[in-house]
Amino acid sequence: MGYARGMVRRCGQPALMVALTLVLTGCGAALRWPASRVFPRFQTIHRLWVLPAAGVTDPAAVAALASLEGNLNRPRPRLYVEHSVGDAFWAQNALPGVTRRTLVVPASRSAACGRAPLAAVAGVRYLCAVLRRFPGTVRGLVIYDPAVPASLNVATTVAGVDRGMLVTPQLAAAFEGAPFHLKVLRDLSGMHWTSRVQAYDWAMGHLWAHTQHRLLFSLSPRIAGNLREYAVATRGFVFWLHPRRPTQRALLKRILQAAPGDTPVLGWWTNEPAGVGLASRYHHFTVATDFCDNLSVFGAFPQVQQLHQTAPPALPKLADRLYVSVEFSDGDNLQFDQHRLRQLWASPGRRHAPAAYTVQPWAAQAAPTILHYYYRTATSANLFVSGPSGPGYFYPADWGGGLSRLLAIGKPLLARTDIRYDEVWNYGPPSGSALPSYARTLHPGALLLGMGGTPWIRRLDGTVAVENAGSPGSVSGALRMLQPFEGGKLQAAAANLAQGVRGRLSKRAPSGSRLLAGGMGAVFSRAAPAGAAEGLRFTVARAAGYPQARVQFQLSGSGDVTLVLGGGGAGGGVSLAYHLRQAAQTVRYVVPLRGAGPLSLTLEPTGPATVRVGGLQVRGYRPAPLRQPVFVNLYVDAWKFTPQDVQRLAEQLGPSARLVRLDQLLALWRRAAAG
């Protein structure tokens, strides 16, 4: 019954506790929160007003709008705020069965507010438009001090408890008078807090008992909106404390200890490993949500009952070659799923490039229609796996006893989302207790373990464990990482392909640039009428039968230069940027050779620069034949890597390697292990 702590009487009626169901009242309506759900279910939406608010950028107006949306949407969402192109996309693709109407905002403040408001804050007319469309949305104003960042978070907690609108002193003056006549519920601008510890300690003493404790909100005061509306809508306790600073850590421990076990911490941390680790020790998991938008709206849809992964293409014939699968990082971050993953999903390469995408399984409750969009638009190239560490982000090594309980809570969720592969970080030694808990409770298809330097796959604790290779942010980085596995050793061509190298002038460089090429008995430079020089291109003859070439030379000078290596065909080039100093830098690079054309090496100064090339050497290589299959799961940085990069990687792997989907990789490994 611990979830029922902190019930608050509002609007003349008591909050009710029925069995293990938490009921948050909202003046005649209730947000029901059964114990079977980790995230609350808002009431079904009948009609939704959509507010195009990309023009609202002033932090004071953004915070005020977030508090209005949060209060409006409890218990039945009525307002959806479009902050970005992404929000507009989800309004079109993740609000099934909802009648939407645009909330028109008058062009002038006087037209929107009924008079010229006292506060000349950009975006104030949007606030007036909402208050006029929905009279009685809030009971009054909660004033915070922008000079004391923690006061915004404390005020957010008050706004959720007392149905208040967040305002600065300047904004308060605009809304206290006509036409809205909103009273001040609480003024925190005169509290004279000198530290965040003072502010949140006050909040613990005065507000904790009046908030719900099934969600915690670690939210930076620099984020004026985004998740803030959800904190208001759920009457959450909001804080921002550093887990490595002693006085802040002590208060943070009090907050974590006061909440019931298995509570999600929404938002983010001032320090990721310290915050996630400390929360794990108190049996709480993190769901990164700091930049999520409109969660109160998406939470009104029923959780997914059953999703199905797409079937992979036919399994290729097992051979002695390198098999590579690609897994994108960061999907445990729910705002990543809402924003960045949407961008990756729109990439033309995504439909055909085999890759696994980490997602947050709790999206099945918190934002089910967003998760469902990805599943219904997936192709046979796309696979979903959980982000760290299965049901939420936590460190199993820090969790201690009770891990099986959390995994049991998440097991039905993973079954509904058809996720059989779980990314696990900070699990302790393989002989520890964490991995057996995963194996016994979840029975996953595989556990994907961190980002090791020596990838392996083996049977461990009753399941299959995969030590990932990672985390490259570019195709060139991925190729360098995979090179040792593609046959181990490379056989050199008999002849140095650099013999007979020709240098010729190519693309013009910016004014003031100078390019010198030495070591081959020639110096190339040219002064154009405007004082500009041109870049230098070498064309290298190639020997047949060698799919790779190693380029090595000394690069020196000053300034910036771009090095472009072309392998003779589409997908065979790489581009590297160097910031030069006078000391020589050794450049070594393995270039895939595509098509029938020669290898080209172009140096293009990108600003006033002097560049010298010495001792150019290009040797052809071919992989030594593999004597057995090799399997590598590549964990790539999703903020830098794209599905197009996956396509380019597939093209550049060479004939002795093949890119496959993760489940195909494991099926091939099992076949090889079976002998």
Image (cartoon, rainbow, N blue to C red):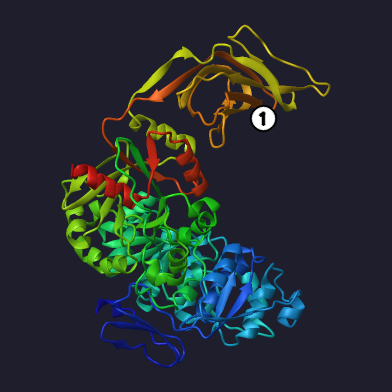
Tell me the quarter of the picture where residue 214 sits.
Answer: bottom left
Q: Can residue 53 be seen in the rendering of this structure?
A: yes
Which quadrant does the C terminus fall into? top left
Residue 525, percent from left and from top:
71, 15
Q: Residues within 10 Å of mark 1 (few under 14, many from 20)?
A: some
User: In this view of the protein, which residue sits in the foreground, 530 or 222?
Assistant: 530
Q: Nearer the viewer, residue 364 or 282?
A: 364
Residue 264 falls left or right of residue 411:
right
Can residue 167 be seen here? The reply is: no
Residue 286 coordinates in the image, percent (x, y)? 36, 60
* Vertical placement of residue 7 versus 55, above or below: below
Instruction: Name the one closer to the observer, 248 or 133.
Output: 133
Residue 467 occupies quadrant? top left
Q: Residue at x 17, y 54 (%)?
A: 436
Q: Which residue is mark 1?
A: 606
Percent x, y for residue 609? 67, 23
**Helix, strand or loop at mark 1:** loop
Position of residue 260 relative to residue 102, above or below, is above
Going 72% across and 23% down the picture, which residue do you hit? 534
Q: Quadrant of the N terminus?
A: bottom left
Total numbered badges shown on the rendered structure: 1
Q: Residue furthest right?
A: 529
Is 55 located above or below residue 300 in the figure? above
Q: Position of residue 309 (x, y in %)?
A: 37, 62
Task: Look at label 1 and name its amino acid.
Answer: Thr
Q: Is residue 291 shown above or below 522?
A: below
Left/right placement of residue 333 relative to residue 176 reads: left
Residue 499, by quadrant, is: top right
